[in-house]
């Protein structure tokens, strides 16, 4: 009997203590809860994915760096074309010794190389001196010439200048594909960070809504406790739920801040990094806007062809350059035969004075006996080309299989997204029903908290599936190596 009274007194004391603590919550905690409930009520600015990617594509340093690849290709082409520039040559030799002019030789030429192994030239020479080589003797007014030289073996159909220019043109085309690959990679990385930022924003909003409902529920139970309709222990359990929801909200808020700062790594303006303001939030209906932002609308497995992929185009252009190198090495197996003919005249301004009977002509021939160096270079060029072909086959298959897998992922995640949405809606209905039963006295705070926890879990699961769906579409964008044109 005494123990029963002691237990009753202790229970009354505990309930009075709890009741006192419920009405004397420290001010700082109340302020934290009020701040949490008002966080999303302030003015905000929405930055959509398309707008974000537009900033990245226009101002990010890596994207600008990718533009240098094209400039490099143009510079290579300009350099290669320099091999066909006309040129002027002047040679002057003179020797005087003890008052005697041994020789005074002046020769000049203007040469125009052409695409095939032909070089046109015009020249003039004026030579004199006491000990001048007799073959260099020319009329007093000088000797003028006009003619051409022709490569009959090596260099007729392809030579170093021709090969360099061909490879430069191919390289310039290759840089376009390489630039697309670099820009696509930057946009893909930026998109993934935006998805993480969006997920953190959705989680913050979710926990804030749950916290608001828990706080409203606690306020109602406290009034019922004061009126004597509910037990004090219900208020205690509700207060614990509020604290747990507040912890979840604080964690979500920290995650949102971290992801916002990570997103700022991709924001630049005039080569100056820009920090995203706290009031900027991502667009909410991202799942419905992702296809338009990444410009993957209309993409299907039936329409996909790996031959148009920028990576494959770049590899094919690389193979074309290797094939040009192979042709050059193959041409080295031919002998070097150069023939030249120049009509000469002492009157440079009279075209009729140039006669075929007055000329300088010559022919030269050279060829290694075993061609071991040339045959070795050709074999190495053939090996490089064959290696590139195998690499192209493997890469084409890998890209095709990757794209097929991603399309399958997207189809599955679309189904999972619909399923998780139904689970969230049903969990919300269960929570509302449980709260209604509690108002009628047929349920408990424990069951309400349990239903609410299930709602949180299903909502987070839906967010997780949504992010997986978004990432799958971003991987499709990356696998196709697309570069949005309307950003």
Image (cartoon, rainbow, N blue to C red):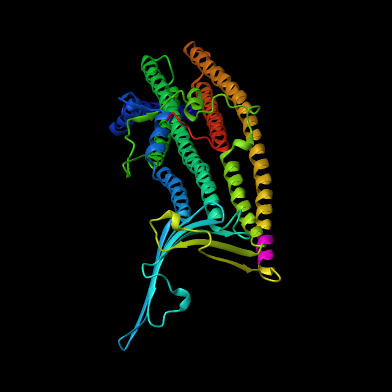
Image position of 156 (left or right of 460): right
Residue 480 locus on image (x, y percent): 57, 35
Front-lying residue, 20 or 206: 206
Image position of 387 (left or right of 74): right
Q: Quadrant of the rendered structure where residue 420 is?
A: top right
Residue 342 locus on image (x, y percent): 50, 61
Front-lying residue, 340 or 337: 340
Q: Hey, which residue is sitting farthest right in the picture?
A: 370
Relative to 375, does residue 392 appear above or below in the rendering?
Answer: above
Which quarter of the rendered picture does the C terminus lie within? top left
Is 232 covered by the magenta stretch? no
Number of numbered callouts drawn: 0
The residue segment tinted magenta is 374-380
Front-lying residue, 101 or 395: 101
Residue at image coords 46%, 23%: 285
Image position of 424 (left or right of 46): right
Relative to 438, does residue 412 appear above or below in the rendering?
Answer: below
Residue 56 locus on image (x, y percent): 40, 37
Q: Quadrant of the rendered structure where residue 214 is?
A: top left
Classified by dominant secondary structure, the portion drawn in magenta counts as helix
Q: Hey, which residue is sitting farthest bottom in the picture?
A: 98
Residue 113 locus on image (x, y percent): 49, 55
Residue 105 shows up from this direction? no
Is 375 covered by the magenta stretch? yes
Residue 5 shows up from this direction? yes
């Amino acid at each position: 009997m005494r123990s029963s009274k002691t237990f009753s007194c202790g229970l009354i004391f505990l309930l009075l203590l709890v009741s006192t603590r419920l009405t004397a919550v420290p001010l700082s905690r109340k302020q934290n809860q009020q701040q949490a409930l008002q966080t999303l009520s302030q003015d905000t600015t929405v930055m959509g994915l398309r707008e974000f990617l537009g900033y990245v594509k226009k101002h990010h340093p890596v994207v600008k760096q990718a533009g240098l690849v094209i400039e490099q290709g143009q510079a290579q082409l300009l350099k290669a074309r320099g091999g066909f520039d006309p040129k002027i040559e002047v040679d002057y030799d003179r020797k005087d010794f003890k008052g005697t002019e041994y020789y005074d030789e002046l020769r000049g030429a203007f040469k125009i190389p052409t695409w095939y192994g032909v070089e046109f030239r015009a020249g003039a020479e004026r030579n004199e001196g006491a000990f001048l080589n007799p073959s260099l003797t020319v009329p007093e007014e000088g000797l003028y010439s006009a003619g051409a030289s022709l490569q009959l073996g090596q260099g007729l159909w392809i030579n170093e200048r021709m090969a360099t220019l061909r490879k430069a043109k191919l390289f310039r085309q290759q840089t376009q594909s390489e630039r697309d690959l670099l820009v696509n990679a930057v946009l893909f990385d930026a998109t993934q960070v935006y998805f993480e930022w969006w997920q953190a924003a959705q989680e913050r909003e979710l926990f804030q809504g749950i916290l608001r409902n828990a706080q409203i529920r606690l306020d109602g139970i406290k009034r019922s406790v004061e009126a004597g309709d509910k037990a004090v222990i219900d208020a205690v359990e509700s207060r614990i739920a509020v604290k747990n929801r507040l912890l979840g909200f604080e964690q979500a808020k920290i995650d949102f801040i971290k992801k916002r700062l990570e997103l700022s790594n991709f924001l630049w303006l005039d080569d100056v990094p820009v920090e995203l303001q706290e009031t900027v939030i991502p667009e909410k209906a991202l799942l419905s806007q992702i296809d338009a932002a990444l410009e993957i609308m209309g993409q299907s497995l039936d329409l996909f062809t790996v031959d148009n992929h920028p990576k494959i185009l770049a590899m094919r252009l690389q193979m074309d350059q290797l094939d040009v190198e192979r042709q050059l090495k193959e041409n080295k197996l031919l002998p070097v035969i150069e023939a030249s003919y120049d009509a000469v005249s002492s009157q440079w301004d009279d075209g009729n004075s140039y006669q075929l009977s007055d000329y300088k002509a010559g022919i030269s021939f050279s060829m290694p006996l075993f061609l071991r160096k040339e045959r070795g270079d050709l074999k190495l060029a053939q090996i490089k080309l064959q290696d590139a072909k195998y690499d192209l086959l493997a890469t084409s298959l890998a890209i095709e299989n990757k794209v097929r897998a991603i399309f399958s992922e997207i189809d599955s995640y679309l189904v999972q997204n619909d399923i998780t949405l139904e689970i969230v809606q049903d969990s919300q209905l269960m929570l509302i029903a449980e709260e209604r039963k509690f108002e009628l006295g047929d349920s408990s705070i424990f069951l309400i908290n349990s239903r609410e926890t299930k709602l949180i879990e299903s909502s987070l699961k839906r967010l997780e599936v949504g992010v997986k769906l978004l990432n799958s579409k971003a991987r499709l964008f990356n696998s196709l190596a697309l570069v949005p044109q309307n950003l």
